[in-house]
Image (cartoon, rainbow, N blue to C red):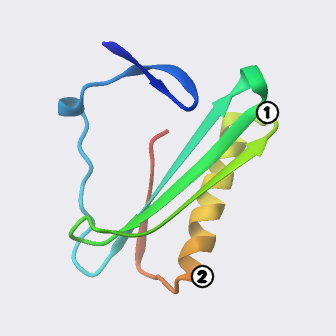
Amino acid sequence: MAIRMSIWGFYPWVGLSSLRWVLPPSGRLKLNVYAGLRTIDRMFGCGVVVRDHLGAGLALSTSLFVGSPSPSIIEALAFLNGLMLCVRMVYNNIEVESNC
């Protein structure tokens, strides 16, 4: 397992061969939500991306906050941000996926 650097600090990196993103069925969109926490400076963030059945990115959003809530609260905020983005873009028939 390799160690990589991200904006959130060091984390173990899993090889891409062991991970696979699955396309949503035709006629559906997939909302992926991401959350990160960096306790050393009390920063956390959320990211969301909406993709179509071909995997093309249709919309994305990122947010950065100061504080140190629990990881489950951060993940819930990421879900909320993603759903609000879908409402603004008038997207429906959506699958939601998280990495946690």
* Residue type at numbered disc 1: Ser
Q: Position of residue 63 (x, y in %)?
A: 65, 53
Q: Image height check: is 87 above or below 50?
A: below
**Image quarter of the N terminus:** top left
* Label 1 or label 2, whichever comes before in sequence order: 1
SS for callout 2: helix
Specify the farthest residue to the bottom.
Answer: 90
Specify the farthest residue to the right.
Answer: 67
* Residue type at numbered disc 2: Arg
Residue at figure coordinates x 53%, y 76% from the top left: 86
Disc 1 + disc 2, Cβ < 8 Å? no
Q: Image height check: is 97 above or below 54?
A: above
SS for callout 1: loop
Real-space Cα separation, disc 1 to disc 2, in angstroms: 28 Å
Q: Based on the displayed image, in which of its 4 quarters is residue 78 positioned?
A: bottom right
In-image side of 80 versus 92 (left or right): right
In-image side of 38 versus 69 (left or right): left
In-image side of 2 versus 78 (left or right): left
Which residue corresponds to mark 2?
88
Q: Nearer the viewer, residue 33 or 7?
A: 7
Which residue corresponds to mark 1?
68
Q: Image height check: is 31 above or below 10?
A: below
Q: Based on the displayed image, in which of its 4 quarters is residue 88 positioned?
A: bottom right
Q: Position of residue 51 (x, y in %)?
A: 35, 67
Q: Based on the displayed image, in which of its 4 quarters is residue 39 positioned?
A: top right
Q: Image height check: is 23 above or below 71?
A: below
